[in-house]
Amino acid sequence: MTATAVDLSPSRYADWKAPAGDSSLLIWPETNELIAATDRNHKTLNAAAETKLLGTPLSEVRAAARKWIGHLNDDQPVIATGHQTELWHAGVWVKNAVIHAAAEKMGGRAFHFAVDTDSPKHLLLRWPGASMPIADDERSATAHWSGLLNAPTPKHVADVRTALTAAARSWDFQPMVFDLLNSLERLSREQPRLPDALCNALHELDGSLGLRYDAMVVSPILESPPFLQFAAHCIANARHFAGDYNAALDAYRDEHGMTTAGRPMPDLFVSHEAIELPFWLDDLATGHRTRPSVFELEKRSVLKLVTGEEIAFSSDENGAAAALRLHKFLAETSHRISPRALTLTMFLRLFIADMFIHGIGGGRYDQVLDKLIHRHFSITPPTFAVATSTMFFPLAVGRSRACVPCVGREGHHLRHRSLGDGKREFLQSIESLPRRSRDRAAVFFAMQTALRNNWSTDPKLTAWERRLTAVREQEQRDVVEFDRELFYGVQPRERLTGLIERVQQEFA
């Protein structure tokens, strides 16, 4: 099928920047257009019958995927977002406020998809002066995906609470992270995997703030017939898909003047013998993962495991049957097909959501995905949205960052003014003597000696040195207090609800 002409140039998107000020907000496109685009996406994707996945219309696979996640009213729009199961900062968290407000405005349904198939990261709870991991599983630094990690033990949660309580005694507010710890302590007994316990603890925290959305970890979706049909389609059309994938990346790099082949992500490897797939192949028995490739044999794409088992697909076979065969093969060999970043977002945007809300990074990657969707499926890619926010630690609100160079310059001036008129007399004497003469050098040395002797007794300089020490200490605290990537739960309730109200006002 030949792709229709669609403007996917950089001018279609905004040049998003993380907002600099505390409690500042970015939503793109403007909310009225976001609502209108959601409606357009809904109508376009539900009518996409000509685009096929192994013989099945895209619209049918989409309807099945939405039913699989429990969305039974297909006329009701789905506004979705997603992120790794980690301690989100406010820029990530605000997407939940946006999906809540948009769904409420449209009479739709909001979903957050918690990605438990990526490598673990951002699991360190930080506050000024200290930090602790949210879980005590020693595999946090080595696990190939976060779903392998255990939820924290009750003792570890208690230790985090004790350390945080000691720190919070000097704060003039109560952070909401204590509510998260209470939920996590209870849920960790019921849900042994970290992503499940953390996803539900975050969901409970947001619920207490008035946010309403469905939270779902991604890994169960990967066993659903719609996802497996999508995966079988990519395997059966591996060379075609890889060609479109790499062409989309090349076009994006050309538009943005990128010369590094690995940016914003590497190409899929393609040779005469093998074609890399846009998935991970997870060995559920060992916890290891590989980048799978297929080889072509008599118009069939063959996926072969290192243990020798193999499965083959052709582009003309029945999609539902292919999904069943793939499910059986993966179950019998204890493996899983996990999507990489673009592939996961492609599935969510095409087959589940009517509007997907990204952060800034995801929005940039999805400029590549728009090109891939257009090339491979010959449809106009559904519009996505971008939302983010910045929140500093409450102790930083209303003040500027400590400026050590500023105070340093004050000290420089104080030192050289400490002799008063006496320094002017020294300088006049120096100017009156021949350059490079011993007498001139002797007067200069005498001036420096007088300055140093005066520095130790000048009360202004003594006070300045105390101020410089204090500012240096504050500078170290500011590294954390002005860090926009602190977990949003270190904020008090009123600051979070204030930002939620601002988002709702945007949709009003």
Image: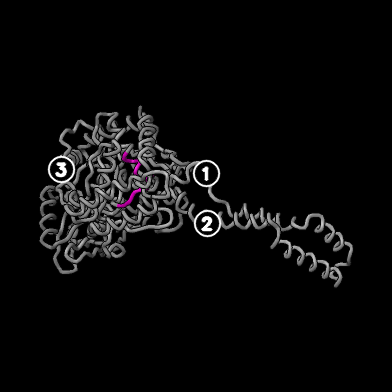
Residue 257 is left or right of residue 287, and the answer is: right
Q: Nearer the viewer, residue 158 or 432?
A: 158
Camera-near label (1 vs 3) is 1
Q: Nearer the viewer, residue 254 or 357?
A: 357
The three-letter amino acid code for the residue at tag 2 is Glu
Q: Which residues are magenta?
A: 86-96
Residue 399, numbered label: 1
Q: CA distance from mark 1 to mark 2?
A: 16 Å
Q: Is the residue under label 3 in contact with that under label 1 (CB below 8 Å)? A: no
Q: CA distance from mark 3 to mark 2?
A: 54 Å
Camera-near label (3 vs 2) is 2
Residue 276 visible to an observer of this rendering: no
Quickly name the residue at label 2: 473
The percent coordinates of residue 81 (x first, y second) are 29, 42
Most extreme residue toward the top is: 508
Residue occupying image coordinates x 73% and y 62%: 454
